[in-house]
Amino acid sequence: MTTAFYPIGTPGTPWGDTERDTWRRQRTGLRSYTEDVLPRIESLSDRFDVSAYGALDYNGETYTLYAVRSLNWNPALPVALVTGGVHGYETSGVMGALQFLETEAARYAGRINLLVAPCVSPWGYERINRWNYDAIDPNRNFRPDGPARESTALIELVAPLRGQFLMHIDLHETTDSDESEFRPALAARDGKDFIPDTVPDGFYLVDDSEHPQPEFQQAIIAAVARVTHIAPPDASGHIIGCPVVAHGVIEYPVATYAMCTGITGAPYTTTTEVYPDSPTASPKECNDAQVAAVCAAIDYVLVQG
């Protein structure tokens, strides 16, 4: 095992309040939720039902969380949930969700009810960070009694609709900074050794190992392959330490890990992972890949019923 140096804390000792405060002070704003995201959400209000579903207050710094719904909501139709920005630093998750709403969502009117939360973690978005203000990963804390308000607010949003969801797609990225910053920070925070891994070069999906839907995943992979390249397995047949179960697909027990895609009970779920640091990938390509994934997912479930 390799113990990586991280400039906060003592190797082998989990962080306490002092270390968390130090980490927090070093996280400065690098972009603006108010300027980048909110105007695009507000511009959708003539075509969709835009409403607040929660608020965050971090030492006086406040963020309103917004959801976008189909304007003519039909209780007789199933629901598709699209989430972005659960990890705020994963830019195409946010921008892909917004681009889908702006360019493709209208063609599903009257066919399925859409519920979209474009930026679940705005504090992390502004600081280009995986964690929230409390150095907590929202995507390991989707529990009703969990410590991440980003996660519990989304749970409260979807709770009245449980039983109506047909699918949920959660838009993410895997970046080079996962290996250079976020996994070393995680090891330091938890007082553990950092074991290096390889960043996968390309797009992949995370299915639910407890309720796998392999044909659903492959329909998405086929659509995204027309936009960007699919990640191959490493030399041991893994992606981020997990066995590759099909082309571009790995599995996690999402409920056990308290991941976002476990909150709806939908029969079809997936987590996308775009690779924005590829020398051949542009921000536009990453956003387009997310949109292609969302459309392919909805198209598939509409056929399946």
Image: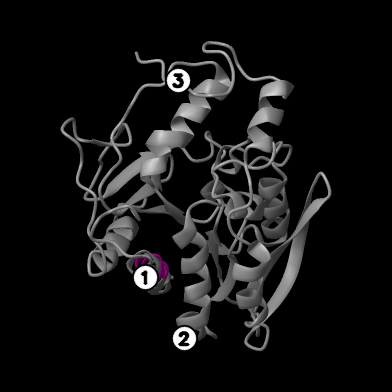
* Residue in the image at 25% along x and 48% along y: 201
Position of residue 212 relative to residue 274, above or below, is above
Task: Locate residue 221, reporting x and y percent.
Answer: 28, 60
**Residue behind mark 2:** 107
Left or right: 147 in relation to 130: right
Residue 196 appears in which quarter of the rendering? top left
Residue at the disc numbered 1? 284
Magenta-tinted stretch = 289-294
31 shown above or below 197: below
Q: Which label lies toward us, 3 or 2?
A: 3
* Circle 1 or circle 3, nearest the eye: 3
Considering the numbered disc 3 on the image, is that residue within a helix, a strand or a loop? Answer: loop
First along the sequence among labels 1 and 3: 3
- Camera-nearest residue between 263 and 304: 263
First along the sequence among labels 2 and 1 = 2
Mark positioned earlier in the residue sequence (3 or 2): 3
Q: Residues within 10 Å of mark 1 (few under 14, many from 20)?
A: few
Determine whether 97 is above or below 253 in the image: below
Q: Quadrant of the N terminus?
A: top left
Identify residue for label 3: 5
CA gap, disc 3 to disc 2? Answer: 50 Å
Q: Secondary structure at mark 1?
A: helix
Quick check: is 292 in the magenta stretch? yes
Q: Position of residue 193 (x, y in %)?
A: 44, 16
Residue closest to the eye, 269 or 272:
272
Which of labels 2 and 1 is toward the front?
1
Lateral position of residue 19 relative to residue 139, left or right: right
Residue at 45% in and 81% down = 104
Tell me the kind of residue under disc 3: Phe
Under mark 2, the amino acid is Arg
Q: How many marks?
A: 3
- Residue 285, image x, y percentages: 32, 68
